[in-house]
Amino acid sequence: MGLPNGGLIFDRSGNLYGSTTTYGSGGGGTAFELVPSSGNWTFSLLYSFGEYINSGGPYGSLTMDAADNLYGTTLEDGAYGYGSVFKLTPSSGSWTYTSLHDFTGGSDGGYPWGNVVFDMNGNIYSTTWLGGTHGAGVVFEITP
C-alpha cells in the first residue's frame, strides 16, 4: 500500500474506509477497510485498481451511500487512461467493482482528482482538471 492521499470515512459500524494512489496487485492503488478490534485495527484489502504504477489510482476520499456502496474516482485508470468514476458493491464478503464512467480527456474531461458527492436524487458530481471546452477541466454529473 502506498500514498493514501484521500481521507478516511466511517461507516455506521465504526469501520474506516480509505484508498491509496499506488501499489496493490494491479499497481494502480487500492481501496481498503480498517475494522476496530481489541484496541487495534484489522486491515482488509477491498480492491486493487488498474495498471498505473505512477500514482494513477484514487486521489480523493471514498464516498459511501445509504446501501454501503463505495464510490470514488481514479486519476489515470479507466479504458482510456484519463481516469474513471467507480462503484464498489459489497457482496458475500467481497467487493464488486463497477466502472460508472471512463474519461476520454476530451469534452467529458480527464484526470478526476477529488471526491464525488451525491445530490438528493442520487446523481454523482465531481470535477476533472483536464478537458472540457477550454481544456482546463469540467464539472461532471453521472446519473445512475
Image (cartoon, grey):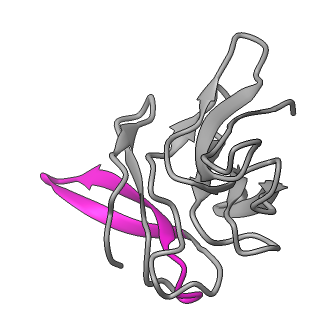
For the C terminus, the quadrant is top right
Question: Which percent across, then down, holds residue 53?
Answer: 50, 88
Please tell me which residue is depicted at 68% across the width and 16% down the height of the picture: 119
Report the side of 4 relative to 137 (left or right).
left
Name the foreground residue: 99 vs 95. Answer: 99
Quarter of the picture containing the N terminus is bottom left
Q: Position of residue 3 (x, y in %)?
A: 31, 71
Judge whether residue 31 is colored magenta: yes
Position in image of residue 107 (x %, y %) = 82, 48
| Position of residue 70 measured from the top left corner of the image (x, y, whole percent) | 61, 45
Residue 58 higher or lower than 100, as above or below: below
Q: Is residue 51 left or right of residue 63?
A: right
Which residue sits at x=70%, y=52%?
Answer: 131
Looking at this view, is 47 or 41 the one in front? 47
Where are the magenta residues, as a range?
A: 25-46
Q: What residue do we see at 67% from left, 30% from top?
A: 125
Name the residue at 67% across, 39% down.
138
Q: Main secondary structure of the magenta part?
A: strand
Rendering quarter of residue 12 = top left
- Give the residue at the far top of this rendering: 120
